[in-house]
Image: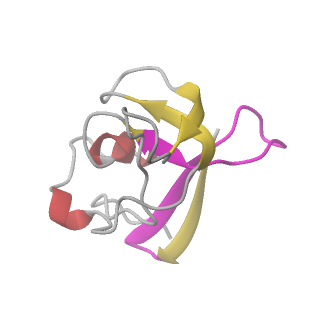
Amino acid sequence: YVGVVLCSPTQYKILLSDSINGTFRNIGDLAGHGQDHCELVGATSDPSSSSLDPDYRTCSGVGYWRYYRGDSFNYGDIGDESDTDNLWYGRWYRCGVIIP
């Protein structure tokens, strides 16, 4: 399940949950800065990194992550500086998709 918190119709936070009534969590990225997460709101291509939160290395916690567009999501630790994989996530996205 995809959840979106609107900052504006063109800038938003994207979250995932395993059920409609579950906890929606951040999404980490192992191979980039979250560009591929725009797939979740219907973007047909990945935006440039200039359309993503420049402070991509925020907070640690538990959430979902994957490597690339089209990959399945995994659940686990993200944003942990002690983790050599550094599954970082950002505060917002601009995917070129307007969400009213």
Q: Residue furthest right?
A: 21
Tell me, yes or no, whether the highlighted magenta stretch contains residue 7. Answer: no
Indicate the quadrant containing the N terminus: top left, top right, bottom left or bottom right.
Answer: top right
Q: Nearer the viewer, residue 78 or 2?
A: 78
Magenta span: 8-28
Count the marks: 0
- At x 31%, y 58%, the residue is 95
Rendered position, 61 above or below 18: below
Residue 2 at least partly seen: no
Q: Residue furthest top?
A: 72
Q: Nearer the viewer, residue 88 or 16?
A: 88
Image spot of residue 72 (x, y percent):
47, 20
Image spot of residue 15 (x, y percent):
58, 50
Image spot of residue 91 (x, y percent):
46, 66
Q: Which of the 4 quarters of the picture holds residue 97?
A: bottom left
- Relative to 63, 45 lies left or right: left
Rendered position, 5 above or below 9: above
